[in-house]
Amino acid sequence: MTSIDYRVVVDGLAFAEGCRFVRGALWFSDMHHRAVHRVDPTTGESLGRWQTPDKPSGLVIGDDDEVTVTQMESRTVARLDAEGGLNTIADLSAVADWHVNDMTDAPGGGLYVGNFGDDSVPPAPPRPGRLAHVSAAGEVAGVADDLGFANGLVRVAGGAVLLVAETRSDPPRITAFDVAEDGGLSGRRVFAEFSGAHMPDGLAATSSGEVLVAMPFARELVLLDAGGAVVRTFPVDRMPYSCAIDEATRTAYACLSSSWEEQECLRERDAAVVAFPLDADA
């Protein structure tokens, strides 16, 4: 399948993850370089770079551009201060059985954080994991069980529904939960179900409920409508792991890489963040 035409925003990265478009700026983690980046989405010019001691992944950008980031191997969530220091706000090791990864906001200043579940890789079956909720005070609790590698996370329906990409469930799927004011989850149901190499990873959504899904092993991004039906697909030439949307211009962004293996990523440095029209036909 031929790749769509896209514009390269930033290249020469090791492994880009946690892509976010916030107030005109593009944010992402370079996991294997242990850095968080903020760039101009048009020029790719760096607007900020912060080193982290652990591998960063999921990002939440506050109203004042305050950055909260997962620290994968230590299974913690930390916040960057004005001087670039990193302050741990929560330890998730009581809930996360293996590395933490993506993250999104929860009501009342809280967070939802996913984790791998275990260190297995296909074709070995995964160990189901739990989704963590971190309160504004830093209290950690498990709010959903039996998730097959909880990966991309996004809230839709005005924040009332949480979508969780279960990358290694059988079959692969995106699961929906109703969100309570205290961050609790209920009403578990399937939002979208896939097959074969279509294993969902990163998620991004519009205010109308459209959901863009990164499918690394299918080398596609898939746009779903608010009901979970496929609207269009965007084939790409490398594996897409994360995505973001600039809703004002209907521009999509994706983090691409030829590998996820650390040493190969550091050697090749072929990861990139790219942009393409969300309404383009594949």
Image: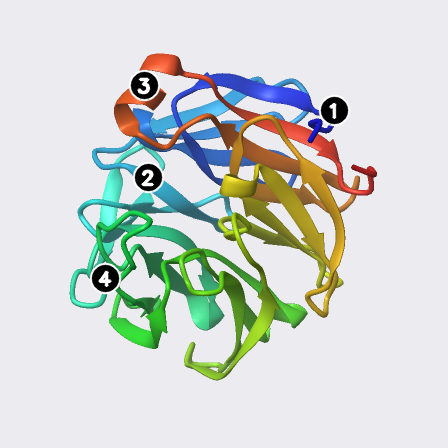
Among numbered discs 2 and 4, the one appearing first in the sequence: 2
Where does the image place residue 272, in percent across and percent down from the top left?
A: 52, 23
Give the Cα separation between the discs numbered 2 and 1: 29 Å
Name the residue: 22% across, 37% down: 54
Disc 2: which residue: 56
Residue 76 horizontal/vertical position (percent) = 23, 52
Nearer to me, 96 or 90: 96
Type of residue at label 2? Pro
Quarter of the figure that contains the N terminus: top right
| Amino acid at circle 3 | Leu
**Of marks 2 and 4, the one in the foreground:** 4
Regarding mark 3 in the picture, which secondary structure is present there?
A: helix
Mark 3, other Cα within 10 Å: few <14 / some 14–19 / many ≥20? some
Residue 75 visible in the picture: yes
Q: Quadrant of residue 225?
A: bottom right
Q: Is residue 34 visible?
A: no
Q: CA distance from mark 1 to mark 3?
A: 26 Å
Alpha-carbon span between mark 3 and mark 2: 15 Å
Image depth: mark 2 or mark 1 in front? 1
- Give the percent coordinates (x, y) of residue 56: 33, 39
Residue type marked 1: Asp
Q: Quadrant of the C terminus?
A: top right
Q: Nearer the viewer, residue 18 or 183?
A: 18
Per the image, the residue denoted by label 3 is 266
Q: Amino acid at mark 4?
A: Ala
Q: Nearer the viewer, residue 79 or 193?
A: 193
Q: Quadrant of residue 155?
A: bottom right
Res. 96 mark = 4
